Amino acid sequence: MRVPDGDLIYIKQNAESGGSGRNIQAGRDQFVFDSGSVHVHFNGLQSPSTPTPSLRPPINLRPPQLHGRDIELRDLGGGDLAALMGRITVLGGLGGIGKSALALTIAYIAKSAGVCVLWVQASSGPEVSEAFRQIARKLSQRDVGSDEVPLEGLNTADLAWEALHASEKPWLLILDNADDPSRLDQDLGSNWLEPSASGAVLVTTRQAHRDVWPPGTQLIRLGPLDPPAGAAMLLALSGSTAPDPAERDAAQDLSERLGGVPLALRAAGLCVAQPLSPIRDFTAFRHALDRDFPNVVDRAAATSPRSSTTDDARSLVMQTWEVSLDALEQQGVSQVRPILRVLSCWASRPVPVALLSPKVLGRTHGPDSGGWNSLVVERALNALSAVGLIDIADENSDVSSVEADAFYRQTGDVRRHRCVVVHPLVAEVNAAHLERSPHRVRTWGAAVRCLGALRDTEDEEIAAQWHLAVPHMMTVAGRLPPSHGELFEIVVDTHMYLSRYLRMVGQYEIAYRCAAALRTRLTAFTPNDRVRYRVELNAAEWAWHMSRLDEADATAAAACRLADSSLGTDSVEFLSARALAVAIHSERGFLESGEKMARELCAEMDGKPHLPYLGMQAHHHLATILREAGRLDEAEKHSRRAVEFSDCLEAAPFSRAIIRHELGVILWHRGHLDQALTVLLEVLRQQRSYLPAWHPSVLVTRYDVASIHSLRGNSIRAFMDFMDIWLAEQDLLGNGHYKTLQTRHQIGQILVEIGQVEQAESILSEVEEEYGKQGLDGRLTDFLSTRHERVHIAAQRGQHVEAHRGWRRILDEEQRSLGGRHPSTLRTHYNWALCWAVLGSPPVARAEMRKVLVARRDVLGKDHYETVQAADALAALARKPYLSWRFGGDRRRNVPVNRAARRNTKGQAGDL
């Protein structure tokens, strides 16, 4: 190459002033001064042997059909040059999102209309400089590269724009892959891009921040295709002309799996279309992705007959975003790759920026990735956002907390947290790269420890972001490689804090899934017995909360064995596991064994005054079991003992409410409705001060209050409350949870009372069926109560013989399981006695009612409202033995007396 002498001297002087080895850019050529000599290097495609780049758009690469871009095409005027004239339009977005395909479509439409279309590959300064030379030559007929024009006097951008502005024929200039506008500024000058009244400028780029483009630029950011558009693209590429509904559904599923990224969709569609491909349909491709994502996603590009020997990284899903990371690192943002790799360890859900702790990242990655502080992290995230690899948005705070509710009421606004979101396919590709990376240990260490930073923080702003961290904790627990066993203990510790948070916000189902997922990973790691104990106990507690009682019993037993073998039977851990086992036995209806275990625990705890919390818990469990067994005097004694423990300990509000709630329920069962209502309303007031209104514990207390209103004849008020509670429980716990079924049962009872018998029967039938389906028919008092109510409906319809037989069957079952003096048994006995009178046997009716009265006096006391009710019924039978009786005088009390108290302690003893 010939270089004018003046230019050579100028270049050499600049190189010498900059030190040995400095690069000087001059047009398309790169000059390097080294040890007194000048070496001329050419950049890749721009070597002397490389043909001059073409300005013609590569129309042959245009997709036959553009899918899912109708809105963007409309914003671009449908290819009508008049809509784009006089301005710069930038198509920005993630690599592989279809920017070039859209630009080619616009180029094709414009070219077909006779417009001069100029296509420039803008990935580097030398490429653009050479293209500008050609534009200037093409439009001005000036010999821009002649030796008579000194190099230092040339600015190819100025020459090109001079020619473009002067052109009389409209033109469309497309700059494709202008991903580094700051570098183009350096190479070509700050005026390398400008609008022109003579034509239109269209730029495709991964750099989608408005501030890097000239003022007035129209920025159109492309997003992923929606599932139907992605499915249409897959079907078209695969050659499917008449897809059946199953094939269309499979295509839509695959489109969602690939995140709607056109580059990945194109690879999948072409792979399925290839005649020798072992992957013949979309379902098989999706399954293959799950098995071997890295090798499957780019299979079409690797096996296509059109693929070149030199892979184009931009055309490969596994490499296209590495190009963006390489470019950012070259710009000096060395933290982008470590951050994106950490984000790939988490879920493809919003990640609070606060989770990316500079302290943790600096400690795990060391100085290799540059310095770490909040400004560095912010700069890296902005850089990743600029190239479309992440999105940055605000997410609402967790408004379930009382503080957030108060904040909302006062300001009319909710707290919002700045979050980043990684596209699912970008995250999956980065996770695949991480598996092969030598830095995977420190990356996983950072991912685990960043989440763990939430554990001990006293920063309320960060603590309020727990709800956003939940999906990431679940993902880490499920994906942490077995080779990183040293991190598993941190994951377990963080999950214990997560459980506390989920308990306080009432997300029991999520907490159960988290605990179950963590427990399944025990087989992949080999933690010590103490860690295994914590995982087993946590899983048992949440299985108990969710009425999965067989599972809860098994895992609680495993926790007991671990505590016994590693810590001994006197340890707090062993005693805590025993307390949970007591609660589970009670819940399963094993009252005799549960009572024995509870008494043993109480005796042991009374001898260990240094463990007052466990003592409180033991007496609370025993009180619950005794109440369920119908021994209310003794139940009240142990409940008051638990209250004393609570007051002396100044227990946490959550625990104190549970203890006092049990006392209120026992008072209600004993017939002291006014006292019970006072206690329960105070508990409800306290719960509402620190729990969200829809928390399961709040709903339980509201249920008990509504039950007392029902007993007092306020049926409509109670019905409205029960409906509200039922709707909340459906969302929180699901239709099959026993608490939801109990509330549904109560709604059916009140419907019977107000005369809506048909609707009530349908509801009660569904409840009874669901008890069997969910394996909850072991909850005998609840299950038989629903059956009892259906028998009552038969009696109301005049089907007295059928009702008599139904009550006899229920009575036999209750006498066998609960005993003849249990309050529930006596209620069934009461209705069965009345049925004898209706069937024409007053002497038998009086004899049976007398048994009910005697038993109630002994069990409930002579002043209890159910005792008074039996006495009144016996007197009426003596006066008018053939009166047409209304059955179920205490029908409304059939379920609530047992059910509400049990459901309050259910799932909460572990918090005591």
Image (cartoon, grey):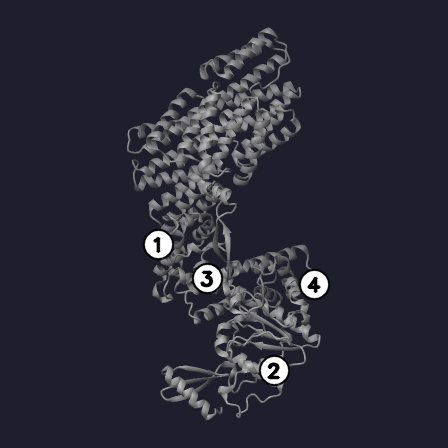
In-image side of 896 versus 174 (left or right): left
Q: Secondary structure at mark 4?
A: loop
Amino acid at dot 2: Ala
Residue on which disc 1 sits: 486
Q: Position of residue 833 (x, y in %)?
A: 57, 15
Asked if the residue at tag 4 contacts the one at tag 2, i.e. Cβ–Cβ closer than 8 Å, the answer is no
What label sits on residue 241 in the rendered view?
4
Amino acid at dot 1: Glu
Residue on which disc 2 sits: 163
Q: Secondary structure at mark 2?
A: helix
In-image side of 358 versus 816 (left or right): left
Asked if the residue at tag 4 contacts the one at tag 1, i.e. Cβ–Cβ closer than 8 Å, the answer is no
Q: CA distance from mark 1 to mark 2?
A: 66 Å
Amino acid at dot 3: Leu
Above or below, 457 relative to 866: below
Q: Position of residue 42 (x, y in %)?
A: 48, 84
Mark with earlier residue (4, 3): 4
Q: Secondary structure at mark 1?
A: helix
The residue lying at 39 percent from left, 38 percent from top is: 557
Residue on which disc 3 sits: 381
- Frontmost of labels 3 and 2 is 2
